C-alpha cells in the first residue's frame, strides 16, 4: 500500500489501532491493569481523538464558525455573478481542505476530532457546488462528481461516512447507466447488481488478505457489509417489483406479477441461506450478522405478499419459535462445539487476531522470548487460548 495516499501518519494510526484493540481485551478481562498500562506506554500516540460527545460538539461549533466567516465574505462578493460564485466556492473549498490537512491533520495530529470532519465535508461541499452549479448537466454527472469527491475523502482521510457515500454513489451510477441503456440492460439489472457487488465483496476479501494495515479493518467491514446487503437487495422480490413499477414503468394488473417472479422469490429465500451457510462454515461474524439481517428482511417480504390474515397469531407463534430455537442453541453450545460457544469471549467481536498477537508480543511475558517455542502466556487465572477458552494462545 502506498502510504502517501493517506493523509495521516501511518505509524501513529497503527499505534492507535493497537491501543483500541488492547482496550477491548482489557474490558474483556483478558489483560489486567498492569498489562494494559504497559500497552498504553508502549503504543502511546500523538493522534488527537476526543470522545464522541466532544467530537459532535466540535463538529457543530466548527460549522457555525465557518458559516459566521462566510456571511461577511458573501456580502463582499455578492455581485460577482454566477460564474464568480462558482470560482470563489471552488477556491474556498480547496482552501478548507488544505487547511484541514496541513494544519489540523499534519501539524496538530487531529484524527476524527470533529473539526477535521467539518473541514472536509464543508470543503468538498463547496467544491461540489462549484462543479455542479450549472443546470445544464446530465443526470449522470451528479453521482459521478459525488463519487469522486466521496472516494477522495474515504481514501485520503479514511472517512467512514464518505465510504458509505462512495458506495451509494457508485450504485447510483450503475443504476443510471443501465437505466439509460434501456432494453435488455434494464431486464438484467438485478443480476448485474448482484454480480458487481458480489465481485466487490470477493475482491475486497482478496485485497484485505494481502494487506497488513490493521487500521483499515473498519473500512473493509463497512465495504463488505454493504456489498453483501446490496447483493441481497438486488434479488429481493419486493425491491425488484417496486422498482420495476415505480422507476422502470412496468404496468401490472390487479393480480399480475413481474416477469420471472419465481426467480426473485427463490433469491429472496436462498440468498440468506447461502450467506448463513458460508458464515457458519468460515466462522465469519460479519457474514452471520448480515445473514440474520437478510433473513429478517426475507420474512417481512414474504409476509407482505403472503398473509394468513391472522397477524397477532402469526407474530405470537413466530416469537415462540424463535425463543425455543434460541434456548436450544444456548443449551447446545454450553460446551464449545466446532469452534462455537455461547459465551461472549471478547468485548469486541470484530477484534483482529493479528492485533492480539502484536499486543502479546510487545507487552506480555516481559516482552522477551527464549526462542524455545515452549513459552505460554499466563493471564492471572490461567492460560489464554482461543479468545478465552482453555489451552494455549
Image: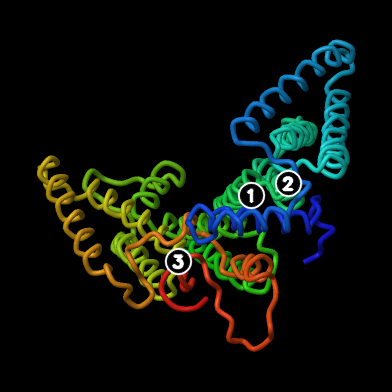
Residue indicated by mark 2 = 153
- Whether residue 260 sits left or right of residue 139 in the image: it is left
Residue indicated by mark 1 = 163
- Whether residue 383 sits left or right of residue 210 in the image: it is left
Q: Residues within 10 Å of mark 2 (few under 14, many from 20)?
A: many
Q: Position of residue 364 (x, y in %)?
A: 63, 68
Do the residues under discs 3 and 2 have CB atoms within 8 angstroms? no
State which tag comes first along the sequence, 3 or 2: 2
Question: Toward which corner of the image does residue 56 lie, by quadrant?
Answer: top right
What SS does tag 3 mark?
loop
**Res 101 seen here:** yes
Residue drawn at the location 28% of the way across and 68% of the way down: 333
Q: Relative to the observer, which residue lies in front, 118 or 58?
A: 58
What SS does tag 1 mark?
helix
**Res 218 seen here:** no
Residue drawn at the location 78% of the way across and 59% of the way down: 11
- Whether residue 223 sits left or right of residue 108 in the image: it is left
Residue drawn at the location 10% of the way across and 44% of the way down: 313
- Whether residue 65 sits left or right of residue 38 in the image: it is right
What SS does tag 2 mark?
helix
- Quarter placement of the N terminus: bottom right
Q: Relative to the observer, which residue lies in front, 54 or 379?
A: 379
Residue most toward the bottom? 372
Q: Position of residue 153 (x, y in %)?
A: 73, 46
Determine which of the numbered discs, if any, sits on residue 381 in the image. Answer: 3
Amino acid at each position: 500500500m502506498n502510504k502517501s495516499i493517506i493523509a495521516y501518519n501511518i505509524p501513529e494510526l497503527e499505534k492507535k489501532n493497537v491501543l483500541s484493540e488492547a482496550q477491548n481485551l482489557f474490558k474483556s478481562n483478558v489483560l489486567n491493569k498492569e498489562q494494559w498500562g504497559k500497552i498504553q506506554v508502549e503504543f502511546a500516540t500523538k493522534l488527537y481523538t476526543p470522545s464522541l460527545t466532544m467530537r459532535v460538539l466540535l463538529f457543530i461549533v466548527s460549522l457555525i464558525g465557518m458559516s459566521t466567516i462566510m456571511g461577511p465574505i458573501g456580502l463582499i462578493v455578492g455581485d460577482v455573478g454566477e460564474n464568480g460564485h462558482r470560482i470563489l466556492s471552488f477556491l474556498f473549498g480547496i482552501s478548507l481542505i488544505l487547511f484541514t490537512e496541513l494544519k489540523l491533520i499534519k501539524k496538530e495530529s487531529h484524527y476524527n476530532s470533529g473539526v477535521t470532519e467539518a473541514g472536509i465535508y464543508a470543503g468538498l461541499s463547496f467544491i461540489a457546488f462549484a462543479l455542479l452549479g450549472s443546470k445544464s448537466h446530465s443526470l449522470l454527472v451528479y453521482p459521478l462528481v459525488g463519487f469522486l469527491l466521496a472516494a477522495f475523502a474515504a481514501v485520503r482521510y479514511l472517512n467512514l461516512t464518505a465510504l458509505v457515500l462512495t458506495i451509494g454513489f457508485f450504485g447510483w451510477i450503475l443504476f443510471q447507466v443501465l437505466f439509460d441503456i434501456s432494453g435488455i440492460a434494464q431486464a438484467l439489472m438485478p443480476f448485474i447488481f448482484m454480480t458487481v457487488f458480489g465481485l466487490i465483496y470477493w475482491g475486497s476479501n482478496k485485497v484485505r488478505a494481502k494487506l497488513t494495515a490493521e487500521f483499515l479493518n473498519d473500512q473493509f467491514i463497512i465495504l463488505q457489509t454493504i456489498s453483501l446487503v446490496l447483493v441481497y437487495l438486488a434479488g429481493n422480490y419486493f425491491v425488484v417489483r417496486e422498482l420495476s413499477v415505480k422507476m422502470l414503468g412496468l404496468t401490472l394488473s390487479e393480480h399480475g406479477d413481474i416477469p420471472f417472479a419465481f426467480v426473485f422469490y427463490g433469491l429472496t429465500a436462498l440468498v440468506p441461506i447461502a450467506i448463513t451457510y458460508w458464515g457458519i462454515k468460515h466462522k465469519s461474524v460479519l457474514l452471520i450478522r448480515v445473514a440474520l439481517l437478510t433473513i429478517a428482511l426475507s420474512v417481512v417480504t414474504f409476509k407482505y405478499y403472503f398473509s394468513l390474515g391472522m397477524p397477532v397469531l402469526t407474530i405470537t407463534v413466530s416469537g415462540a419459535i424463535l425463543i425455543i430455537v434460541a434456548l436450544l442453541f444456548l443449551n447446545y453450545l454450553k460446551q464449545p462445539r466446532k469452534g462455537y460457544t455461547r459465551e461472549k469471549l471478547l468485548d469486541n467481536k470484530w477484534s483482529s487476531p493479528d492485533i492480539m498477537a502484536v499486543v502479546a508480543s510487545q507487552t506480555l511475558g516481559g516482552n522477551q522470548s527464549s526462542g524455545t517455542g515452549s513459552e505460554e502466556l499466563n493471564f492471572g487465572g490461567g492460560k489464554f487460548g482461543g479468545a478465552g477458552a482453555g489451552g494455549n494462545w
